[in-house]
Amino acid sequence: MLEDGTPTARRVIPRWRPLARTPEHETRPLTQVRRSGNLPTGYLDDAISRWSSVQSLENASDVIDAALTFENYAAAREAAQFVLSDSAHPVAGLRSAARQIIGLDHKTPVLAVSHDAEGSKEAIAKKVRQLKERLHDAPRDAITCLEIGRLQSLVGQIKSAGYYVERALLQEPNSRYIIRSAVRFFVHSRDPERALEFIRRSDAVRADPWVQAAEVATSDLVGQTPRWGVRQLRALTSQKHLGIEHSELAAGLATLELKNGSQRRIVAKLLSNSLQNPTENALAQAVWVNEKADIKANTESHIAHMSSAHEARVLAAYESGNGLQGANEAWLWFRDQPLSLAPALAGSYFSGTLLSQYARSLHFLEAASLSHPNHPQIINNKIVGYCYLGKLEAAKKQMELLETFSSDQHYVPFIQAARGLIAFRSKKIAEGRDHYIQAVETTTKAKDFRLTYYACMYWAEQEIFCGAMRPDEARNLIAELDSRFSKAPKSFRRFILQAWKARRTILETFILRELQENLFADVQKNAPSFDLARRALDQDKLVTP
């Protein structure tokens, strides 16, 4: 079975993109952070000396940073020209600072995020080799270290990636870009405590709202109270005008206040302020909070006009049941954030459950397998896709992998339902029923009624597909499910009805095309299936909260 995949929890964890594709506003220096650095007076001379010895992007960045701090632009002009040269591969934030040094402009537009694919595993390996060669010549280049870590994360090489991410942090412990990227890595590698450790070691967290936003999200993830970001609560609720640099912090604090049971007006004010000039990440958080708390913050205009707001549009597609929009935006979201599992699972759901485009569903899953090898949810969704495409051998191979997660109670009903699906598709109808009954009983016992409904939906579908009932019985079962699903718990009723509407259309088409003509021969011997399905969906057994 495929569940809808809507996030039960969401935090404003920073995005991780290559520096060249990171929007300029996320790397633009903050005046107050520079002034609080208390750099020694000889820092600029030392930076120029290092630049004179080795002309690298890292050393050029140090010179430009120091020159802006001490307002000695002339000293950094050569370094700025190097950054802007064709051979230097200039990046967004550094390019902006270099242009400021040489007076070309004082404000550059936000860099549009590219959606170019990272490439195959072989292509990524080639990029890593090239970056390691560059690192050999400039071993203190933290940006190169970080990019190696990012690329290795994309192909599941977590241990090696962690080495390069931490190496970057040791070189530049106060770099906003490196800290925020590292937070995303440590969350991905299931070590958010390590992320929080590096955040709190940095000086940047004391004054930089971008880093404070990461601290709020990470602290909440590990169950701790933020130390620095939360201090901005009063300021962010009282100020009338907030810049984009505060949007993620305000959205994160709104989520935290909602979780802690604060007054709705505080949550609403923070959320409204975060939307004055939001990042796409802050916008997605606002859409999620809107749904969870019915705050009614105005997100529609941003969703419609922000080109990079793919996750926000995916969340909106969940609400509207627009499978085509959801699948399209999920792919763009995945291309932007290939380290994230969420867009692939969303795309798999929209493509498979709502659109019945199982080849497209598998495309999402195969792409996500690079950075999430052997993830049980990916394996489960692959089984569904392969079964519906008639590729039973491929489904059985994935089933062997899914069985290895049988000790994890969360995945037990998925394993039971997957067994049932394969059995039905292998024409082992009685065995398929037994497995689906187990899935229904397991989810009901665990009070995971959302999964109970999905298990019943897929079970009933297989009963009809296998020809286990006459056309009139099939239509009666569909009518019964119409009634029962319309009474699903309010918290997930909309998603169940969206999925059922799509599946119902498929079933009605199947009945008209197949049952009336070809499958009467097996009806009598399989007739008890309808009674089994009825008992499984009986309100006495399926008690909804």
Image: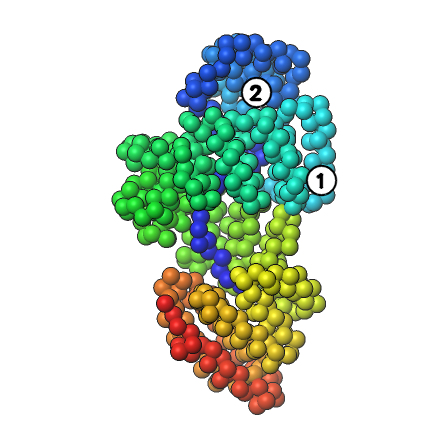
Query: Crowdedness of circle 1 by 10 Å Cα count: few (<14), some, many (20+)?
Result: some
Residue 367 appearing in the image: no
Residue drawn at point x = 53 percent, y = 9 percent: 42
**Percent position (x, y) of residue 66?**
52, 15
Residue 255, by quadrant, is: top left
SS for callout 2:
helix
Residue drawn at point x = 60 percent, y = 84 percent: 519
**Percent position (x, y) of residue 456?**
49, 72
**Which residue is the site of mark 1?**
125
Residue drawn at point x = 51 percent, y = 70 percent: 442
Task: Give the amino acid at mark 2.
Answer: Ser
Along the line of sight, the residue nearer the viewer: 395 or 497:
395
Task: Give the amino acid at mark 1.
Answer: Ala
What is the quadrant of the C terminus in the image?
Answer: bottom left
The mark that comes first in sequence, 1 or 2, is: 2
**Residue most toward the bottom?**
524
Above or below, comparing residue 475 to residue 108 in the picture? below
**Which residue is the site of mark 2?**
61
Along the line of sight, the residue nearer the viewer: 63 or 390:
63
Q: Which mark is residue 464?
A: none
What is the quadrant of the N terminus in the image?
Answer: bottom right
